[in-house]
Image (cartoon, rainbow, N blue to C red):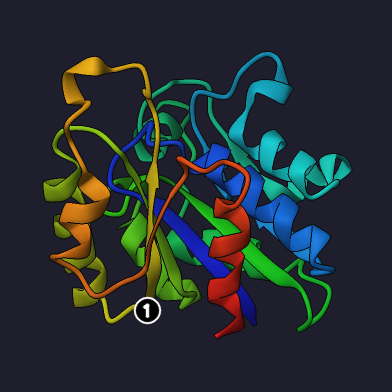
């Protein structure tokens, strides 16, 4: 099955914001996208504030929110711990089956967003890395373009490579463009000297999603 697994170097790096843009561009390109956020903690009272709803909305599938995100937990902590608090046992196999099982055809593009970083715990028996391996989808790594980004990105890339997964590329997400303390920083240039993967910055908001989607053509 065609698709991608989107992970981050950490939590709060903007995976969902980037994901919305990618999904919208894929849909514009005539691709049938099946978004999945298989487990989400910190589930809000207003469902439109959830990551899952935002991904579903980007694909015009708000009515399928139960399919997009079948596992929702209130505590704003790791999904693994949040599930334990609510006495629920969630497994990698379950999450994998929920991601794949409801896709309608081989032509569907499965877009899966993990929770937190690549090595963050996602359920009772595994990490995001384990779900990525179970799905065996190419990886897009999202990194917040800030101080410390290079270390986090290189560690995450090493982890992805150790899992034997295909890293399509890295997205540097502009989280805080007003931070003058880092105005002389150039993570794009510095990372480009250290890795052999494509890097795209969200700095150019009009083109970055289309550039990412071009990765899927190769």
Secondary structure of the residue carrying numbered label 1: loop
Q: Quadrant of residue 133?
A: bottom left
Residue at (46% x, 78% y) in the render = 136
| Residue 51 vs residue 127, the one in the foreground | 51
With 127 as the anchor, is 49 left or right in this view?
right
| Residue 7 vs residue 211, the one in the foreground | 211
* Residue 167 can be seen, yes or no: yes
Question: Looking at the rendering, in which quadrant would you find the C terminus?
Answer: bottom right
**Position in image of residue 1 (x %, y %):** 64, 82
Q: How many numbered marks are there?
A: 1
Residue at (71% x, 35% y) in the render = 53
With 74 as the anchor, is 66 left or right in this view?
right
With 26 as the anchor, is 208 left or right in this view?
left
Say which residue label 1 marks. Answer: 166
Above or below residue 178? Residue 210 is below
* Residue 94 can be seen, yes or no: no
**Position in image of residue 214 (x %, y %):** 59, 72
Residue at (49% x, 39% y) in the render = 88
Above or below residue 171? Residue 108 is below
Above or below residue 102? Residue 186 is above
**Position in image of residue 86 (x %, y %):** 48, 27
Q: Quadrant of residue 62?
A: top right
Tell me the crowding category of disc 1: few under 14, some 14 to 19, or many 20 or more residues within 10 angstroms, Cα based. Answer: some
**Position in image of residue 181 (x %, y %):** 17, 18
Q: Residue furthest front?
A: 184
């Amino acid at each position: 099955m065609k698709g991608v697994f989107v992970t981050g170097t950490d939590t709060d790096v903007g995976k969902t914001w980037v994901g919305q843009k990618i999904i919208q561009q894929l849909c514009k390109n005539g691709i049938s996208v099946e978004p999945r956020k298989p487990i989400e903690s910190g589930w809000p009272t207003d469902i439109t504030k959830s990551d899952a709803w935002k991904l579903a909305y980007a694909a015009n599938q708000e009515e399928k929110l139960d399919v997009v995100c079948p596992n929702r937990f209130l505590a704003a902590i790791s999904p693994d711990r949040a599930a334990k608090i609510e006495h629920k046992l969630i497994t990698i196999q379950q999450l994998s089956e929920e991601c794949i099982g409801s896709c309608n055809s081989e032509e569907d593009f499965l877009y899966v967003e993990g929770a937190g970083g690549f090595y963050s715990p996602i359920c009772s028996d595994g990490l995001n890395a384990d779900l990525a391996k179970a799905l065996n989808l190419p990886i897009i790594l999202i990194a917040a373009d800030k101080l410390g980004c290079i270390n986090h990105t290189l560690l995450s890339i090493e982890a992805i490579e150790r899992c034997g997964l295909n890293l399509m590329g890295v997205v540097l997400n502009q989280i805080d463009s007003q931070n003058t303390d880092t105005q002389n920083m150039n993570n794009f240039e510095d990372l480009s000297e250290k890795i052999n993967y494509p890097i795209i910055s969200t700095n150019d908001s009009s083109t970055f999603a289309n550039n990412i989607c071009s990765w899927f053509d190769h």
